Structure formats: C-alpha cells, structure tokens
Amino acid sequence: MAVNIAIVVGNLGKDPEVRFTQSGRAVANFSVATNESWVGQDGNRQERTEWHNIVVWGKQAENCGQYLAKGRQVCVQGRIQTRKWTDQNGQDRYTTEIVAQRVDFLGGAGGARASQETQDQGFGDPAPSFQSPPIDDDIPF
C-alpha cells in the first residue's frame, strides 16, 4: 500500500499565475508559506519559513486566480510530485510541488470560507468544481 497525501495550511507568497494549455485547460501556480517556531537551546525563539510550490488544474485553477491574492490564507490538500526538466545549459533540473486536489480559501470577507476540489485529477469520483457554503450573518461566533 502506498499513500501520497500532503496538507498545507499557510499564506500565499504572491498572486497565483494562471495560464492555459494549448487545449484550453487552466493551470495555476502559486507558493504557500508555512512557519515553524521553537525555543532554541540558548532560550531564544527561533523561526523558519518553508515555501511550498502549488499546482492547480481546471476550473479550480481559474477560481484560484480570481479569488486568491498574496497574503491570503489557504489550506491545500493534494499529492507531492517531482518533475524533471532540462535547463538552457542542458542540465537536468527538478521541482517538487503539491498538485492540489482541494483548495480551501480561509479567512477573507466576513470570514466566509470557499472550498474547491478538482474534477479530473484521478482522485476518485468527480467532485464539484466550486462549492461555497451560504453565509449566515446570524452565526453567533
């Protein structure tokens, strides 16, 4: 049995870049920062930021391009993938990224939360491409 699941909750480092393949399919790329802090042996607080490259496909990519911006908090769920390519000098290069199955938009206007799942990334049954729960202004919290 093999499992390849990544869950990252953090903030966008820049606005998503949305492009379209020759067949017209949208793809969005953005980075998410996660922070870790601890107290070192010397008693001083230490902090480290890890950057995660995210790839989103289809309608979800279009929605990310429309609704996400630098600094926005998201929860990304997907699989880790490493790609290989050859640079201009003929050297092999590698990139490790998270191919998103689901992106939850956290925070935002009035604390509303929007959820998205990919339809055709091979993660099981097709899911709705965009879901947004109704906003209820009478929620007591």
Image: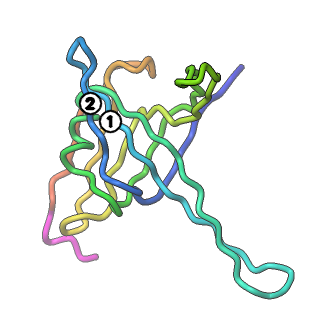
Residue 28 numbered tag = 1
Does the magenta stretch mainly form a helix, a strand or a loop?
loop
Q: Residue at x 27, y 43 (%)?
A: 64
- Where does the magenta region start and end? 136-141
Residue 16 numbered tag = none
Q: Residue at x 69, y 22 (%)?
A: 2
Q: Residues within 10 Å of mark 1 (few under 14, many from 20)?
A: many
Q: Are circles 2 and 1 on residues that touch, CB within 8 Å?
A: yes
Give the alpha-carbon distance from disc 2 to disc 1, as whole Å.
6 Å
> Most extreme residue toward the top, as rendered?
23
Q: Residue at x 37, y 33 (%)?
A: 56
**Under tag 2, what secondary structure?**
strand
Quarter of the figure with the N terminus: top right
Residue to which mark 2 is pinned: 19
> Most extreme residue toward the front, as rendered?
89
Residue 25, x across and y down, in percent: 25, 20
Residue type, label 2: Arg
Q: Residues within 10 Å of mark 2 (few under 14, many from 20)?
A: some
Residue type, label 1: Ala
> Most extreme residue toward the bottom, as rendered?
43
